[in-house]
Image: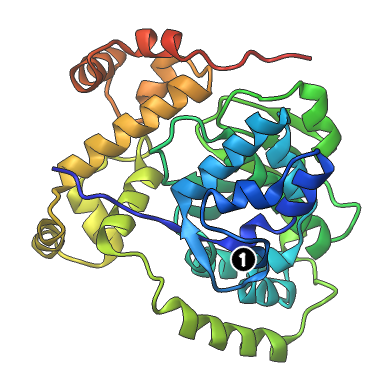
């Protein structure tokens, strides 16, 4: 039996939702009310909601309003206010690198279901987004909102004319490629292992215009107080580490316990107290991630088996059929992703 992992996200991540829906001829109050929200909730820095409801609200809104680029539009209208006190910290960091470190440390205050990290490759650096929520198999509006908002925040933080070198989505496109180029002003590609935004490495250490150590320190102290009640539990932490290491190194309890600074038996005991084993978490995450990629992307099945940590495609196909009662190809055909268009 696998423990149910519930993730929360701040309602401030929906800032601008009401205005956008009205501009598209819809009724934001009715859409919000279906999830127990009011327009006032979008202004709160502290109110949160279940990530499942958040994702469903975006998907239903896009479908109801006939707006394929709903997530992109919403993200393009946002600024640091969506992050509350975390936004204050990021705005007043000395460099983009310092801001990235702060975001990595405190992002669970804003959204427990995602994790951001960066990896430099010579002249370019990838800002990678790791997703932990796979309970709904089509979350493309949610992911497009995340990268669209990140792009806007970087433009505010670094400079208005800032552009990424390229963007990579893990899903198949919802809109024509020209739509993505219009929003991001750079090359955008799809069906990757993770969502990622690539920028010039040299930008990481450029001084930021709005740096203020006193304001940043005060905001960080306030954020640390708030975050005590929103730290990830052991199942969430382990799930996140499995997600980050699948396909890179063996998803073993030995590796994960070392990353957490625990011995193997302590981790096993803590997971048992939550009614789950490490193997169950790995298998569950693999299957949920597989189902998401098969429906929402057109990634080659052999490549998918590799990024999920299987030694070969036959092992993946066997495990998938055993869990789902159908082959990976059969699953994909039944839930075909949108094709790429110019």
Q: Which residue is drawn at 53% across and 43% down?
A: 55
- Mark 1: which secondary structure? helix
* Residue 43 horizontal/vertical position (percent): 68, 69
Residue located beneath label 1 in the image: 41
Compare residues 3 and 278 and report the one nearer the observer: 3
Q: In this view, does 331 lie above or below 1?
A: above
Q: Is residue 267 above or below residue 174?
A: below
In the picture, which quadrant includes the C terminus? top right
Tell me: 142 left or right of 20. left
Q: Which residue is drawn at 40% across and 56% down?
A: 7
* Residue 33 horizontal/vertical position (percent): 57, 53
Compare residues 45 and 275 and report the one nearer the observer: 45
* Display coloring: rainbow
Quarter location, residue 261:
bottom left
Tell me: 135 left or right of 157. left
* Residue 281 horizontal/vertical position (percent): 23, 44
Tell me: 196 left or right of 263. right
Tell me: 64 left or right of 56. right
Q: Is residue 82 above or below residue 297?
A: below
* Residue 320 horizontal/vertical position (percent): 26, 20
Q: Which residue is drawn at 55% across and 73% down?
A: 46
In the picture, which quadrant includes the N terminus? top left
- Looking at the image, the residue that sits furthest to the right is 161
Q: How many labels does the image show?
A: 1
Question: Can residue 121 be seen?
Answer: no
Q: Residue at x 61, y 33 (%)?
A: 169
Quarter location, residue 83:
bottom right
């Amino acid at each position: 039996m696998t423990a149910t992992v519930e993730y929360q996200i701040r309602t401030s991540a929906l800032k601008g939702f009401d205005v956008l829906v009205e501009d598209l001829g819809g009724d934001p109050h009715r859409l919000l009310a279906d999830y127990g929200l009011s327009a006032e909730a979008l202004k709160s820095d502290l109110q949160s909601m279940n990530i499942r409801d958040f994702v469903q609200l975006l998907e239903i809104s896009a479908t109801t309003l006939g707006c394929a680029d709903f997530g992109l539009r919403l993200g393009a209208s946002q600024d640091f206010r969506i992050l509350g006190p975390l936004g204050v910290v990021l705005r007043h960091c000395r460099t983009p690198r310092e801001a990235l470190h702060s975001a990595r440390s405190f992002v669970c205050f804003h959204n427990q279901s995602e994790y951001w990290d960066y990896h430099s490759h010579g002249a370019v650096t990838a800002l990678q987004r790791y997703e932990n929520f796979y309970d709904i198999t089509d979350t493309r509006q949610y992911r497009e909102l995340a990268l669209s908002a990140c792009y806007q925040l970087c433009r505010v933080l670094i400079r208005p004319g800032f552009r990424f070198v390229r963007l990579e989505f893990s899903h198949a496109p919802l809109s024509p490629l020209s739509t993505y180029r219009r929003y991001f002003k750079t090359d955008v590609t799809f069906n990757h292992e993770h969502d990622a935004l690539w920028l010039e490495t040299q930008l990481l250490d450029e001084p930021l215009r709005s740096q203020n150590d006193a304001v940043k320190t005060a905001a960080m102290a306030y954020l640390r107080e708030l975050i005590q009640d929103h730290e990830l539990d052991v199942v969430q932490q382990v799930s996140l580490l499995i997600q980050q290491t699948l396909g890179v190194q063996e998803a073993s309890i030995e590796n994960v316990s070392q990353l957490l600074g625990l011995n193997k038996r302590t981790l096993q005991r803590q997971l048992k107290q939550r009614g789950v084993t490490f193997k169950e978490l790995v298998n569950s995450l693999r299957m949920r991630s597989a189902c998401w990629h098969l429906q929402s992307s057109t990634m080659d099945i052999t490549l998918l088996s590799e990024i999920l940590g299987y030694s070969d495609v036959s092992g993946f196909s066997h495990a998938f059929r055993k869990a789902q009662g159908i082959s990976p190809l059969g699953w994909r055909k039944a839930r075909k992703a949108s094709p790429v268009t110019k």
